Image (tube, rainbow, N blue to C red):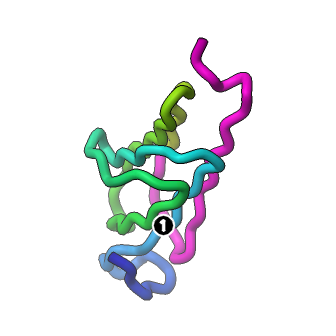
Amino acid sequence: MFSNAGFADNGNKIPVLVKSNVLSEYYLDGELLGKGRSYYIDIFPSESYELIVSPEGYYSKEHFLEPPYMSGITIDFFFLIEDKKD
């Protein structure tokens, strides 16, 4: 699941670390990847993606990934009290 690509210009997948301050489910293009406080995903450098982080009891947040990418990307999601569902 983890690769060592430098700049993402060679067609290899590159790793992306996605983190959340609360236990969350991670979705990439609508597909459930897993659950936890952090998750590594591998992406192709020439493609676009929709990343959704969905913690229980909170509203989901999304992030759109657009090329070009560089190896070593980290995306942080932070959920506040204001993000809790009623």
| Residue 28 pos. (x, y %) | 34, 48
Quarter holding residue 19: bottom right
Label 1, on which residue? 16
54 relative to 18, above or below: above
Please report the residue visible at 49 percent of the width from the left and 85 percent of the height from the top: 6
Q: Residue at x 52, y 60 (%)?
A: 38
Which residue occupies the foreground of this view, 31 or 13? 31
Asked if 40 appears above or below 60 in the picture, the reply is below
Q: Residue at x 60, y 12 (%)?
A: 86
Task: Say left or right for 77 vs 56.
Answer: right
Q: Secondary structure at mark 1?
A: strand
Asked whether 85 or 11 is in front, the reply is 85
Which residue sits at x=59%, y=64%? 74
Q: Is residue 58 left or right of residue 33?
A: right
In the image, residue 10 lies at what x, y percent? 35, 81
Question: Is 62 in front, or is 24?
Answer: 24
What residue range appears in magenta?
64-86
Quarter assignment of residue 11: bottom left
What amino acid does circle 1 point to?
Answer: Val
| Residue 71 percent across, percent down from the top left | 51, 76
Residue lying furthest top: 86
Q: How many marks?
A: 1
Q: Is residue 80 magenta?
A: yes
Position of 81 relative to 53 (above/below): above
18 drawn magenta? no
Report crowding for label 1: few under 14, some 14 to 19, many 20 or more residues within 10 A (C-alpha): many
